[in-house]
Image (cartoon, rainbow, N blue to C red):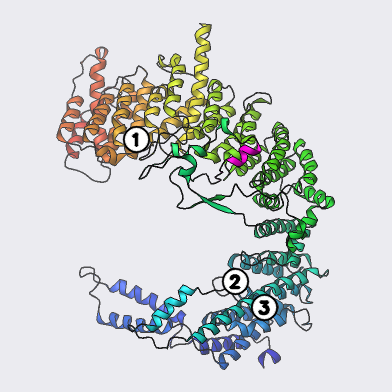
């Protein structure tokens, strides 16, 4: 009555909404009132509590209040209610209010409506037909407010029910096509920004919340047996009788019928969305929405209807970029769905290698898994060799252990050269016909090689999956049509063209996994020149794409099947022909491929290391950084872990020994600087080469700090003395790459995890450097020591003898002749005392007090430097004791403060 005669009387409508809310949800108290009373109760309780008696001693009135609140809370949290006719009428009234003229009325009514839908299960089935009627193009008398209200009802509140994505075939089958068709409604206008945002929110909510609804539900025989046992058990006694054989058969029949009906509903939904898309009057926004919703219907257990496959195939060359993107994702899924199962056979690794694996855990390279390794003397170069070898694509198999049942693709099964057209399914025929059309291919490649977002585009995994599926399912049928485009794109240095080649090449290499030898051999005869051409045209924008392309192509592949690619990349990455950038880029691309193979390409890693070692003295910084990163991956598998065999890949220890031999010209220098002396030409050349080599080694140490599985402590210790000679005390104004790198290396190495057996070696190296002629090196020892102790505190505390060595080392440097070293030793001592690394006992106090009381000669001109150093060391030590207790005043502090006050008038630097 009010809506019809006085719709602007919003206060009355608010009261009506409140009455409906109370009728449906009131259980003796309102949630809002209860919350405010609960809050006030906690405030009163806190203000009246007796802290001396603790939490349990509250006054009686408070306890009565708490009991009352508990009772109200119990009534409030009762969930679920019986859904009656009156509730149905109330929901219809709420829907009427939710689609009325005024936004505040609509908003309040929608909140109550959503709460009701959450309370009464399946009540949405009554409302959805009424909501969809308001959105229908046939509803010509509707207003824009009703249209928006209906959309808000479908969207729901943020944490509540979303009617557009409920797990119900009937509802989804009605709502999704209706959402798309509402674009033809007279009330709908995209000129209204709020409606556009609302539609975007609904689509986004469906994408985020929609779960795939099941089609095929089955109950296994074993499950039925267990249920029968439970039904026949005596304890507890079942309240229902066990079902008879006839009832079980009837149940199974109902299950089958239900599955068939669900499959039909699924196909009807797909066909309804396709019918919507055929309407030429549909606005662009709703066409995009329908395509998105259709893409969500891809599923593993039921093939997509052929009409949908046709739509997505045609959409690959649609004018709209967003529809093309959805079509690419959908086609990748469709091709995976259409993938034919390949025959696999069970093999026993010991039968292939002829060696039984030892009992227990035995990881790493061993005789039993050597047949999986890349071996250039036993590559499949002919049809006979290709067929005689067993291929294992998964990289992790065999390194640690073998699967219980190892299934690999049957070598005896000769792959069919091409899938005959007659044997293809409807969906496969559609894709085959379109990709066999030269015009379609021309347009597709043209679209794929367009730039999307300048400077932000990158290798697209969805496009890669599309081509991988295409070549996996259809073999090399489409290659003759695609190849001229690939050739042309590879010669074009533009970013978008190169990226398109990367995506197709990676898909081609991965898709050819199960091709016959003749096909693969033909493919690589074409691919090798193409990759060479593309790598010649590599640019700053495209080198990351080529790295991703090769890494993706090599992921999860047997290296023996990719020997053409690895041999091509290993040819001469540091040729210097295209400048330093091209060298660094080729190394990056090679690193991407080798890193995916991990332990299975030890021979290639040895070859690469032998190739790189003479070239470690690189002039260019970008090449040095890349070499450092590549070295990290070369030594990645050289791990010293329990039950792990020594690797057949290169060893860090041997490499460091060879590097130290070449760094000998620098070992005799007290400090290493990044400049060259002009006195002796021969020595200068040797020294210059050594400095360049050291820069590359620093890049390697920095790169390996965060990537390696274990820290090679012993090998790093051999390089430690050299680093101490470079590292600066303060950060220079002028940028010196070697000093900065050395500083970073020392910081990273000091943070490394130490095992108890490594501690004496590290301390011996630090003690050696503490006696160095360079005060910079002695200063760096203290900064290294601080970080090392704090990162390995508990390990060091478990070895008391080493704690004494560290204390002795700090005290030795506290008496150093250089002022800066003494200051840092004082800071280090303070930190070690504060974290209780060693106690401030009476012997340490006495030692420091004795040093601080060293007598100085009276005459100013006769100040003995040794006496001054000892007195300064004592004062610094006492100051460190004070600073080690910033938050309390221990018993010893007053006396030490009094001792320090005696030195206020001492000569510089003690006075400061």
| Left or right: where 337 falls relative to 481 | left
Q: What's the CA distance linking mark 2 and mark 3?
A: 27 Å
Q: Is 4 placed above or below 282 here?
A: below
Q: Mark 2 or mark 1, which has the lower sequence index?
A: 2
From the image, tell me which residue sits under label 3: 149
Q: Quadrant of residue 312?
A: bottom right
684 or 588, nearer to the observer:
588
Q: Position of residue 90 (x, y in %)?
A: 59, 89
At mark 3, the secondary structure is helix
| Left or right: where 313 falls relative to 781 | right
Residue located at (61% from left, 44% from top):
552
Query: Which callout, 3 or 1, points to the residue nearer the camera?
Result: 1
Q: Quadrant of residue 153?
A: bottom right
Q: Quadrant of the C terminus?
A: top left
Q: Is 289 placed above or below 57 here?
A: above
Q: Position of residue 299 (x, y in %)?
A: 63, 65
From the image, tell me which residue sits under label 1: 788
Q: What's the CA distance linking mark 2 and mark 1?
A: 56 Å
Q: Mark 3 or mark 1, which has the lower sequence index?
A: 3
At mark 2, the secondary structure is loop
From the image, tell me which residue sits under label 2: 213
468 or 230, nearer to the observer:
230
559 or 553, nearer to the observer:
559
Q: What's the CA distance linking mark 3 and mark 1?
A: 65 Å
Q: Position of residue 617 (x, y in %)?
A: 54, 20
Query: Which callout, 2 or 1, points to the residue nearer the camera?
Result: 2
Q: Mark 2 or mark 3, which has the lower sequence index?
A: 3
The answer to whether residue 593 is visible is yes
- The segment highlighted magenta reads 380-395
The answer to whether residue 592 is visible is no
| Left or right: where 803 falls relative to 164 | left
């Amino acid at each position: 009555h009010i809506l019809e005669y006085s719709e602007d009387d919003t206060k009355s409508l608010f009261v009506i909404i409140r009455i409906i809310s109370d009728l449906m949800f009131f259980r003796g108290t309102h949630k809002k009132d209860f919350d405010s009373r609960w809050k006030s109760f906690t405030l009163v309780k806190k203000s009246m509590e007796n802290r001396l008696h603790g939490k349990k001693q509250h006054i009686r009135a408070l306890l009565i209040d708490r009991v009352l609140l508990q009772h109200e809370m119990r009534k409030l949290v009762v969930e679920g209610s019986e859904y009656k006719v009156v509730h149905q009428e109330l929901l219809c009234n709420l829907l009427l209010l939710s689609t009325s003229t005024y936004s505040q009325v609509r908003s309040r009514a929608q909140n109550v409506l959503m709460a009701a839908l959450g309370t009464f299960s399946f009540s949405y089935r009554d409302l959805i037909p009424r909501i969809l009627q308001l959105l229908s193009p046939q509803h010509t008398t509707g207003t824009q407010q009703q249209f928006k209200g209906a959309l808000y009802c479908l969207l729901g509140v943020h944490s509540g029910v979303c009617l557009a994505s409920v797990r119900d075939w009937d509802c989804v089958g009605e709502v999704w096509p209706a959402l798309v068709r509402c674009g033809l409604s007279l009330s709908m206008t995209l000129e209204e920004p709020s409606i556009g945002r609302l539609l975007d929110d609904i689509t986004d909510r469906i994408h985020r919340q929609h779960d795939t609804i099941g089609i095929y539900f089955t109950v296994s025989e074993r499950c039925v047996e267990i249920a029968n046992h439970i039904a026949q058990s005596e304890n507890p006694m079942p309240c229902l009788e066990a079902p008879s054989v006839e009832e079980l058969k009837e149940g199974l029949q109902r299950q089958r019928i239900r599955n068939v009906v669900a499959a039909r509903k699924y196909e009807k939904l797909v066909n309804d969305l396709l019918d919507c898309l055929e309407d030429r009057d549909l606005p662009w926004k709703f066409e995009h929405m329908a395509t998105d919703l259709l893409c969500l219907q891809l599923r593993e257990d039921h093939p997509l209807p052929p009409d949908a496959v046709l739509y997505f195939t045609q959409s690959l060359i649609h004018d709209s970029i967003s529809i093309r993107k959805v079509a690419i994702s959908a086609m990748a899924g469709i091709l995976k769905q259409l993938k034919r199962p390949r025959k696999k056979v069970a093999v026993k690794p010991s039968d292939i290698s002829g060696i039984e694996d030892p009992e227990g855990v035995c990881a790493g390279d061993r005789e039993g898994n050597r047949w999986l390794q890349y071996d250039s003397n036993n590559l499949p170069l002919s049809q006979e060799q290709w067929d005689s070898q067993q291929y294992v694509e998964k990289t992790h198999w065999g390194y640690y252990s073998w699967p219980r049942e190892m299934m690999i693709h049957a070598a005896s099964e000769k792959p069919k050269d091409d899938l005959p057209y007659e044997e293809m399914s409807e969906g496969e025929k559609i894709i085959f016909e379109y990709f066999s059309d030269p015009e379609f291919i021309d347009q597709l490649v043209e679209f794929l090689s367009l730039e999307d977002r300048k400077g932000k585009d990158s290798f697209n995994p969805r496009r890669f999956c599309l081509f991988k599926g295409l070549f996996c399912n259809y073999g090399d049928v489409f290659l003759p049509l695609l190849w001229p485009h690939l050739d042309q794109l590879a010669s074009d240095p533009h970013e978008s063209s190169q990226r398109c080649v990367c995506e197709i090449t990676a898909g081609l290499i991965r898709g050819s996994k199960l091709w016959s030898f003749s096909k693969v051999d033909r493919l690589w005869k074409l691919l090798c020149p193409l990759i060479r051409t593309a790598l010649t045209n590599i640019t700053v924008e495209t080198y990351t794409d080529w790295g991703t392309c090769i890494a993706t192509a090599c992921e999860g592949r047997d290296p023996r099947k990719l020997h053409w690619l690895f041999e091509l990349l290993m040819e001469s990455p540091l040729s210097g022909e295209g400048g330093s950038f091209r060298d660094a880029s080729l190394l990056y691309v090679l690193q991407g491929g080798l890193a995916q193979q991990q332990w299975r390409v030890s021979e290639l890693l040895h070859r690469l290391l032998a190739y790189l070692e003479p070239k470690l003295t690189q002039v260019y910084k970008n090449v040095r950084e890349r070499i450092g990163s590549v070295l990290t991956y070369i030594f990645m598998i050289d791990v010293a872990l329990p039950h792990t065999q020594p690797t057949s890949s290169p060893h860090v220890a041997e490499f460091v020994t060879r590097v130290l031999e070449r760094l000998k010209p620098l070992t005799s220098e007290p400090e290493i600087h990044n400049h060259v002396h002009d006195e002796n030409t021969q020595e200068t050349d040797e020294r210059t080469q050594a400095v360049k080599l050291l820069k590359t080694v620093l890049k390697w140490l920095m790169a390996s700090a965060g990537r390696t599985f274990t820290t090679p402590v012993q090998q790093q210790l051999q390089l430690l003395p050299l680093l101490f000679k470079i590292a600066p005390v303060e950060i220079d104004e002028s940028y010196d790459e070697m000093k900065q790198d050395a500083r970073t290396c020392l910081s990273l190495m000091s943070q490394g995890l130490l095992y108890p057996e490594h501690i004496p070696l590290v301390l011996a190296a630090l003690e050696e450097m503490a006696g160095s002629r360079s005060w910079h090196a002695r200063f760096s020892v203290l900064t290294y020591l601080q970080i090392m102790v704090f990162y390995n505190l508990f390990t060091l505390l478990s070895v008391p003898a080493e704690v004494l060595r560290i204390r002795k080392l700090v005290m030795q440097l506290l008496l150093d002749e250089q002022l800066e070293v003494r200051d840092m030793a004082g800071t280090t001592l303070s930190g070690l005392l504060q974290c209780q690394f060693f106690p401030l006992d009476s012997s340490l106090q006495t030692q420091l007090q004795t040093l601080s009381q060293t007598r100085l000669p009276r005459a100013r001109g006769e100040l003995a430097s040794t006496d001054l150093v000892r007195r300064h060391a004592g004062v610094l030590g006492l100051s460190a004791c004070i600073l080690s207790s910033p938050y309390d005043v221990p018993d010893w502090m007053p006396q030490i403060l009094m001792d320090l006050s005696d030195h206020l008038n001492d000569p510089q630097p003690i006075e400061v």
